[in-house]
Image (tube, coloured by chain):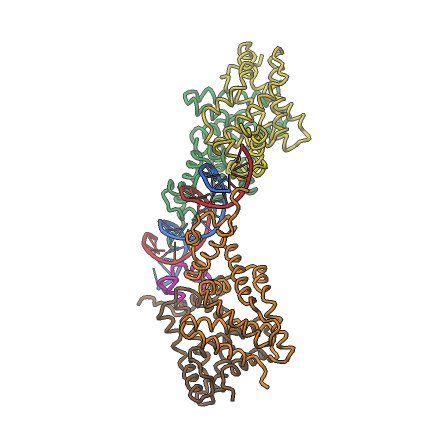
Chain colours: A green, B yellow, C orange, D brown, E blue, F red
DNA sequence: GATGAATGAGTCTTCATTCAT
DNA sequence: GATGAATGAAGACTCATTCAT
């Protein structure tokens, strides 16, 4: 093959897209993105058929990254609290370390163009978390709440936490810990 | 004035804007909005100088509406829990009754064009809620958390709750109650 | 109404389109056309939804013009030969007087984007000619040929004639006459 | 030469070009053509310098094919009518057998990019036909018409005939014969 | 020579905003 | 004030052509 499609270039585009979208929203011109990625305007379209396609791919890409961050070092055998804490900490840490991606993700989530497949693909890597919730409910540790509701609460609380950490970077520890305590107290069963 | 600007028309535009933005996002054309409002394209610009201006005004408008909903019947003298419950219920109810406005608001919040004044104006009507938080902390009912963090948690948890109610409308009661319990258990001090 | 759509402008665009398409083919940019028409690029699209739409309208417009030219002064009561001659002469004269339109028409006819409606609308004004052919066949003046075949032959022969007249403008009379004689001899029954 | 340009490939491209251009017009992308030809996008440009060049070559190629079809079995010694009939029949037959090429040719003929050389090269192989016309005029069989006019008439009448045959394939014989009779009656001198 | 990724000028179309009526 | 036609800058996407592999 003559000059194979470069994974590097693809990643450069995705990364530039995350940054630009975080800064300017989804209305950002593709030319700005390709420019930031250091490729020609047309090149973007050899890697992604349309702008919508690019955004969908970016969504999946970020979701996968988050899942990877969460799952690395996941203490599968440990207690529910330990596992939840791991999930919480790694998600919050990821969000703090990757503010652009996090912001871009939020933009994409309120966007109307996400395909059903992307949404599905976005949730897929989080089965471990769902299993965690199931376990917790089975062990009667959690309150009797729909599993998805619990997952959503974990999500929003951690995102709120990230935002505060981003605003007050010196208080990482405090917010990460407090956030988790609010979550744990909120969803577990009072003995 | 020969023909005064009509408050009706202004409201029609704001209302149409909320709906259209909820449906199509902020990229929606002003012509679609003016059309939905039943006025001419140009008329929109006699009421709002620019599109950005319109969106900022819409933001304030919705925020004020929420504040009004929350403050009507606010039991100023009652216990912290009562007052918080009132706030929670009225916000959730408002969100369920006004899904368009709620959705539009979320779009606007991730948008990059909100002015500092709008943001300030948006928070202003919620002093009562802040006072509530202050009280609660003073009475050592709440955990020791920054007041704004608590406010943000109230916000996100209730929005998550609204979303679930919108998805499963038959379970209003359950979600509204459960959501509140999670919140209360999460932020209050364990004796 | 505030500034009604101007028929003049619409015509200016159609006329510019005919000229530009005649000169550069259907690949001509819409911006060149709007420019030639003396309007802004966007204005073209307030009169014609898309470029394809413009071309379809241009087709109908020219076809209607030809029909008008043919039908003005049409000697409905005279002999078949007289009527045919009238049709022939007026079409040839129109083509010689309007080379741009004629050339544009040829481009459009080989184009793949003509809608069925346009094609139908294009043939509609020529009923009188068909009636002429019917009459001629009924009177056993013409050879026994499918009416449409005869119509097509009239068309191509006259277009060929126009081209030669355009090349040798001094010989208008000769070509117009010779062309007609070829046609007449070709399609009439030898006694 | 290490690897000589393959005549096969060149022909594949020309043939694909004819087909694609017949189907989609001259606006068809070169990538579609190369794809249909089973070669890489870039390969097309090692055989034809530019797209315009390709089209010019295609024009000549088709014209040569037509000439070959006409001249094979040409009864050089026979009567004017015989010879004309041969020309007519073989052209019509070719057109019916090669509708793609025929359609592509029509597109190219209204195109503005044919070079003078191509036009000349396109007419060249038809000397025999011109000689036929000269003979006929000399023998006072034909009317006194410019030779090129006669040639053009032969051309358009036969093309019209082809179109009808393509539309009504069951009537090949009828149309081919009728067309020729119209031509013959039209251009020959009435005794 | 063959391949197909890379390029960027060029295209159609949209849309916020202006302004004649 | 209300209207909606006019404007032209900006944007997504295409495509002939080049060139690294």
In the depicted structure, whether residue B186 falls above or below residue D134: above
Which one is nearer the viewer's eye here, C32 or B110? C32
Q: Quadrant of the C terminus of chain B?
A: top right
Q: Position of residue A186 (x, y in %)?
A: 58, 21
Image quarter of residue B189: top right
Res. C75 in view: yes
Which one is nearer the viewer's eye here, D75 or B17? B17
Res. D16 in view: no
Image quarter of residue D8: bottom left
In the depicted structure, whether residue A185 falls above or below residue A48: above
Q: Position of residue C135 (x, y in %)?
A: 63, 75
Q: Say which residue appears at 47% left-offset and 54% top-offset.
A: C13
Q: Residue furthest right?
A: B170
Span of residues in magenta = D29-55
The reply to whether the magenta stretch includes residue D39 is: yes
Which one is nearer the viewer's eye here, C49 or B24? C49
Q: Residue furthest left?
A: D1
Q: Position of residue D72 (x, y in %)?
A: 45, 82
Question: Is D76 situated left or right of A154 in this image?
Answer: left
Which one is nearer the viewer's eye here, A105 or B109? B109
Q: Position of residue B81 (x, y in %)?
A: 61, 15
Question: Is B38 situated left or right of D59 in this image?
Answer: right
Q: Say which residue appears at 54% left-offset and 67% top-offset.
A: C70
How many numbered discs sit on the rendered protein?
Answer: 0
Majority SS type along the magenta span? helix
The reply to whether the magenta stretch includes residue D155 is: no
């Amino acid at each position: 093959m003559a000059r194979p499609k470069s994974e590097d270039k693809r990643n450069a585009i995705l990364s530039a897209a995350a940054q630009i979208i975080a800064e300017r929203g989804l209305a950002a011109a593709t030319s700005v993105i390709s420019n930031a990625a250091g490729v020609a305007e047309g090149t973007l379209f050899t890697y992604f058929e349309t702008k919508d396609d690019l955004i969908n791919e970016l969504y999946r890409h970020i979701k996968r990254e988050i899942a990877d961050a969460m799952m690395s070092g996941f203490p599968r055998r440990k207690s529910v609290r330990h596992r939840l804490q791991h999930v919480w900490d790694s998600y919050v840490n990821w969000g703090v370390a990757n503010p652009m991606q996090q912001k871009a993700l939020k933009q994409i989530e309120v966007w109307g163009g996400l395909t059903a497949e992307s949404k599905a693909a976005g949730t897929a890597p989080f089965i471990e978390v769902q299993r965690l919730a199931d376990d917790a409910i089975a062990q009667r540790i959690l309150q009797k709440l729909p599993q998805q509701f619990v997952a959503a609460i974990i999500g929003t609380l951690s995102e709120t936490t990230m935002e505060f950490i981003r605003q007050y970077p010196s208080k990482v520890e405090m917010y990460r810990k407090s956030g988790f305590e609010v979550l744990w107290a909120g969803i577990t069963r009072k003995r």
